[in-house]
Amino acid sequence: MNRGLDPTAIGKSFFRDYYRKLNPEDVDVSSFPMREFAFSYFEGAGMQRHEAFRTPADLSEHLRHTVPRHVYYSSAYYTNPSAKDMDAKGWQGADLVFDIDVDHVKTPCKELHDSWTCKKCGATGQGTCEKCPKCSSESIEKEVWVCETCINVARDEVLKLIEFLENDFGISKDEMSVTFSGHRGFHVHVESEAIRSLGQDGRREIVDYVKGLGLDYKQILVRVPGGFKLRFDSSASGWYGRIARWATLYSSGNELVMDLKTWQIAIEKCVSSEGAAIDEKVTVDIHRLIRLKNSLHGKTGLKAAAFSIEELESQHLLNRVKAFKGEALVEVKRVPQVVLDINLKEGRQRIPLYAALYLLLNGAEIVSFQVL
Amino acid sequence: MRSELILTDEDLRKYPFLPSAVERVKELGLTLADVASSALKSVIERAGRYIEASIRNSEIPPPAEDCDEEIVSFMVSLLILKLIGDRLLVRRFAATFARRSRFFLGGEEQDKVLYLLSSLGIKVRRAGNAFGYPLSVNVFDYLSNMPERRGSWKLVHRIVERGWVYVGKAEAIRLGEERLRTLIERRVEEIKVDGLQIPDPLYSLAEKLSSEWGTYLRKIKENWAIAGVDDWESALPPCVKTIMDSVKAGKNVPHSARFMLASFMLSVGLSVEEVLEVFRATPDFKEQIARYQIEHIAGLRGSRKKYSPYKCDNMKTLGLCVAECNVKHPLQYYWKSLRHRTTTKRDKV
Ligand code: SF4
Ligand SMILES: [Zn+2]
Ligand SMILES: [Zn+2]
């Protein structure tokens, strides 16, 4: 079966199949009627915001009918979620949400699947790049893909974050849920009465805490004979305990007394290893729209599946996010060496359907596409 | 949180906002008409003095000798504030009243502090002097009420353990002060005056205070008119304008926003005095501290480094950017719109 080479039409027809089979409970979220929903479609740009639904069944009906390319819902609860104006919406609180995306993390695999082009001088290269090495321009066009390594790196950051949330903030695992972001990372949601009403400043403080931002050695060290030591011993929890553990690597004696310079190195090392690489904008925004669990990402065709913490530690996370079975015969120009868990070569090849759809939706140059 | 701790009249006199104080007045069965009657004239006068103090940004006078009089005066103050209906004044009052309470709390035994904070809704418990700290506070209560987001208050510098932050007694009290501020603001907001029969003496007091407040605000506004550039404000980039509006409305804006506003105004040539005037509207305004901070940003103190306002990129990460202006720096926006204005003026001539 050849569905022709209109990526939008092909993508939409597969999304339609997917949403037809979706159950209302798959898209259920807490306080359902208080959430704002938003959609963008295969046709036309822009986003349709300020939608609200009475029940998950109404929403899944809407998904079946309109087959959106992207589906979002608000982390916030509103008395009147479909109002257009923020004041009229009546903000009642918001979940605490973290976004972890390997865009902001160094991974070894980007050389294999990402590339960039300088919009000014036309230079190109593999991997990622913020500033053109030739002309120093910062207007860089990036082509990014996701592979299994990316997902594993993101997962490790999620686990770090969860450690902070549990041990420091005392949030229990059943107040947290983790969903795949649909592309290169995960979202961690915390739903708890104690957090709902927390404002932006409080949330920013949580961000700084889990990233270890703003740690000032003057605040945490005290002067002692022979140098400096931590204000509290290593049994103190929070960053003190973490820093103490790293400092043992740098200290010769068994008393943790070191000079300032060494402390700074130890603290930096500790922060860069233990801090969780989250995107602060998402956490601080109390009106944020977030991809709905079990919806499809319109540029990958992958499912925003929900993971339990135990499942996160398992081996093949990708298996849970593949939404389509079967195979396809595709011919692609200029392919990344690896996408998802598939190695690619030039020319015509038989690959799993989920990978073929990913290539198609993420804008690879596809010469032919045939579902087998 | 020991239940056998009984609040005395003396406690209710110092803390007339406590739930048990409200209960007690309910039991008295006072009506508004009673309050307005000449027998309780002292109550209305007292409420008036409390609000006047916050208009002038000075300390709230000490509580009445009689516990019931104090509780009723406090409640009448809230009602009058509601009648005046100005949020900035409510914030002012809440801040000054909370400050008076902090002063009393400072003199209390630890157990009583624990009890009082709990009744304000802060989860707090004894820490048994772990790491030298007598108390610990629920981390989210800490985050919602921390007075500053830097230095020793910053959460990364604290011992945080399974949802609890260790604090000293004075710190716990400071958190309580912030909490009380929010509670008082909320209490006023929740008062419903529709359908209430407001007795004349109360009404005329509200009117008198309202006009005093109006005079005060006008004075501030006059100081706002900045020499040279008329209509100076309309050239502001949307982000700075937003912060300025919040500050003028007496909202409690985050530190980063205050920094932005101050550094921006200094950069476009306003004086420390002029910047200070703007911040006078903030609820927790303390002239000395504010002056110190502004002079610091202006590079007149400390490192002698003049701080520049944030770039658009930084504004975006801080969540302070509110539009897409196609500029790299908010200052760029400002100069552009000023330049535009002068050319159009010349065109007309
Ligand atoms: S783009 Fe720059 S100038 Fe415009 S609102 Fe955002 S931060 Fe301000
Ligand atoms: Zn270039
Ligand atoms: Zn990868």
Image (tube, coloured by chain):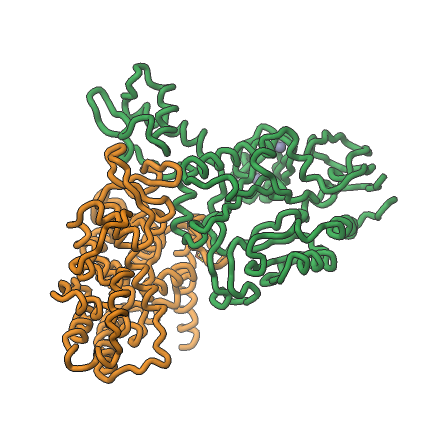
Tell me if residue A39 comes above or below residue A212 in the rendering: below
* Residue B291 visible, this angle: no
Q: Where is residue B198 in the image (x, y as percent from the top left)?
A: 28, 81
Q: Where is residue B83 in the image (x, y as percent from the top left)?
A: 30, 76
- Identify the residue shown where x is 59% and y is 41%: A118
Q: Position of residue B314 (x, y in %)?
A: 42, 48
Q: Colour of chain B?
A: orange
Q: Farthest left residue?
A: B65
Q: Describe residue A22's horizontal placement relative to residue B292 as left or right.
A: right
Q: Position of residue A222 (x, y in %)?
A: 24, 29
Q: Which of A170 and A6 is in front in this view?
A: A170
Q: Farthest top residue?
A: A253
Please tell me in which quarter of the rendered image ligand 2 is found.
top right
Q: Which of A106 and A118 is in front in this view?
A: A106
Q: Farthest front residue?
A: B4
- Identify the residue shown where x is 74% and y is 39%: A354
Q: Number of labelled discs? A: 0
Q: Colour of chain A?
A: green
Quarter that holds the C terminus of chain B: bottom left
Tell me if residue B139 comes above or below residue A90 in the rendering: above
* Residue A203 visible, this angle: yes
Q: Nearer the viewer, residue B214 or B231?
A: B214
